Image: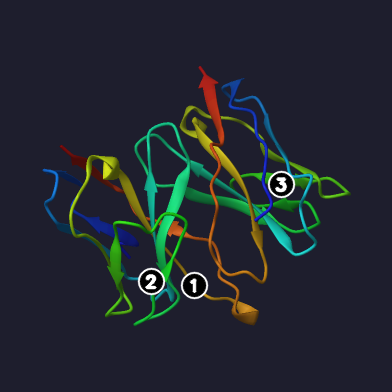
Amino acid sequence: DAKTTQPNSMESNEEEPVHLPCNHSTISGTDYIHWYRQLPSQGPEYVIHGLTSNVNNRMASLAIAEDRKSSTLILHRATLRDAAVYYCILRDHFSGSRLTFGEGTQLTVNP
Amino acid sequence: NAGVTQTPKFRVLKTGQSMTLLCAQDMNHEYMYWYRQDPGMGLRLIHYSVGEGTTAKGEVPDGYNVSRLKKQNFLLGLESAAPSQTSVYFCASSYIIRTGRAAEQFFGPGTRLTVL
């Protein structure tokens, strides 16, 4: 699986937008970009995924660069509950269902 | 729906003891997975199953065995526990969408295991 690079940590203020970057320069044409997050003392939860076009759902937006070598997870108004480790994961469409987790980005939200 | 549940939530073992972790899902998902997470690290895949009666090795399978006798249950066994297996264990499940590709994974709350 192609690797991703994320900052170790980021900080944000409550009710402000947060942009979490992810670099994946070796992404292949069949790799989907997935984001999961892990709240303290909980299992990970799915946030969003995309292939080429930008995606929106009730939790977040995913902006994908035109060359697909990077992407950004956007939380439009951070809340204290959004403090978590965010994982950017590439998953090949044809290689099965497994996820390979890196170390992710620890997001701190300040009140 | 309860989603994905794990039993037990906590366990302390002595080196050499055996135990089984139970994962259950009530979503009729085909795929199930076992991960471990060590402090400050991401999750690593131990074993997974693409259907009842099937299992496959993941990234770190040594020292573990699994069974999927029923679609809704996925068991993780430690035959002879070692301190290196001290970790938090997460189970997950996912369903199949069109073209046979798996959808997103749903995770359980985890089992915290300490091996002394």
Label 2 CA crowd tier, 10 Å (few <14, some 14–19, many 20+): some
Q: Secondary structure at mark 1?
A: loop
Residue carrying label 3: A62
Q: Is residue B32 visible?
A: no
User: Given contact means CB atoms under 8 Å apart, are the residues at marks 2 and 1 in contact?
Assistant: yes
Q: Chain of mark 2?
A: B
Residue carrying label 1: B95
Separation of residues labelled 2 and 3 (CA atoms): 27 Å
Report x, y in % for residue A109: 53, 23
Residue carrying label 2: B27
User: Given contact means CB atoms under 8 Å apart, are the residues at marks 3 and 1 in contact?
Assistant: no
Q: Residue furthest right?
A: A66
Nearest-to-viewer mark from 2 and 1: 1
* Residue in the image at 35% along x and 57% along y: B62
Left or right of A22? Residue B57 is: left
Q: Secondary structure at mark 3?
A: strand
